[in-house]
Image (cartoon, helix red, strand yellow):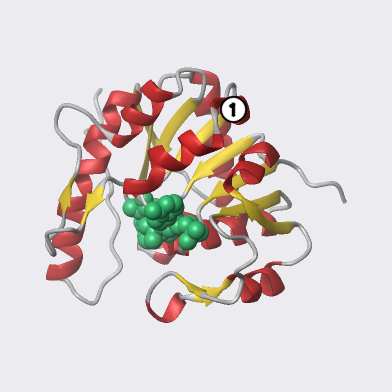
Amino acid sequence: MEAKLKIGILGTGIVGQTLGQKLVKLGHSVLLGTRNPSKLDEPKGRGPSARTLSDWLAEVGAEARISTFREAANHGEIVINALNGGASLDVLQSVGETYLNGKTLIDTSNPIDISGGFPFTLFVKDTDSLGEILQREFPNLRVVKTLNTLTAALMVDPQRVGNGDHTVFLSGNDAKAKTQVLELLREIGWHDILDLGDISTARGTEMMLSIGHAVMHALNPAEIAFKVVRNKRP
Ligand SMILES: NC(=O)c1ccc[n+]([C@@H]2O[C@H](COP(=O)([O-])OP(=O)(O)OC[C@H]3O[C@@H](n4cnc5c(N)ncnc54)[C@H](OP(=O)(O)O)[C@@H]3O)[C@@H](O)[C@H]2O)c1
């Protein structure tokens, strides 16, 4: 059977691996990009979910491949940014606009700065966001910030919490790109998808990280998600 969409994922941490596995399961062709594609035997990610890329490939199957960041971007009709926030701009610059222009970038990254320890801070906030920084740098890339408020496990399996009755947000300037991402989110199993508006609204969802971590810490151990409860107007 021919793959439905070609998707390039920049990043091989828990987010890249988890999204990649789910998207292959849904019938898409996935290429994961990493700094050193020949080093497949080092564990990626943290904690019990960390696994090597060899193990990932063996588990995920034939519709998945691993190569450089540029190859991943080149492969993707849709590109996913699953990079460390601090590395995102540098990696996209190293990929180059030729490989990015006109494409939709699903941006799951957060501008987390752990250089001062925990609780972490954000290296951009209030008047700007990482989503906007990437959009400004690549005006012809269609950046859609989404999924960044969720754990990797919840991104691909909303049912894990509250029977899936919680909210995922979208921020982006390009209506067609947002529709494309919305369709992919529905395919993954999302129902409550809230379009917040243009990419500047990514400030809000990136800053949700602080409250998200505070809530998770307070309820520890717990998996949590945010639900926007709307007032029903007559
Ligand atoms: N973990 C979560 O549950 C979660 C939830 C929501 C949002 N996010 C956001 O999603 C993104 C990915 O998170 P993650 O936990 O999967 O992984 P991560 O550890 O934040 O980042 C992993 C990726 O970043 C790349 N990277 C790191 N430093 C780099 C550098 N100096 N130069 C080039 N590339 C570099 C790594 O490249 P290599 O492949 O070469 O190692 C790896 O592919 C982050 O922005 C995070 O804030 C994470």
Observer able to see residue 158: no
Return the x and y of residue 197 as percentages of the image width and height. Answer: 34, 23
Amino acid type of the residue tagged 1 in the rendering = Lys
Residue extending farthest to the bottom is 48
Residue at the (61%, 61%) spot, across then down: 21
Observer able to see residue 75: yes
Label 1 residue SS: loop
- Figure label count: 1
Return the x and y of residue 3 as percentages of the image width and height. Answer: 79, 47
For the C terminus, which image quadrant? top left
| Disc 1 packing (10 Å; few <14; some 14–19; many ≥20) | some
Pointer 1 residue: 103
Name the foreground residue: 54 vs 217.
54
Name the foreground residue: 92 vs 155.
92
**Mark 1 CB near ligand 1 (8 Å cut):** no
Residue at the (16%, 26%) spot, across then down: 127
In screen coordinates, is 211 left or right of 151?
A: left
Residue at the (26%, 72%) spot, across then down: 222
In screen coordinates, is 223 left or right of 182?
A: left
In screen coordinates, is 2 left or right of 7?
A: right
In screen coordinates, is 45 left or right of 186?
A: left
Q: Quadrant of residue 100?
A: top right
Image height of 177 relative to 41, above or below: above
Residue at the (18%, 46%) spot, across then down: 122
Return the x and y of residue 8 as percentages of the image width and height. Answer: 62, 45
Return the x and y of residue 155 as percentages of the image width and height. Answer: 45, 55
Q: Quadrant of ligand 1?
A: bottom left
Q: Quadrant of residue 231?
A: top left
Image height of 124 relative to 48, above or below: above
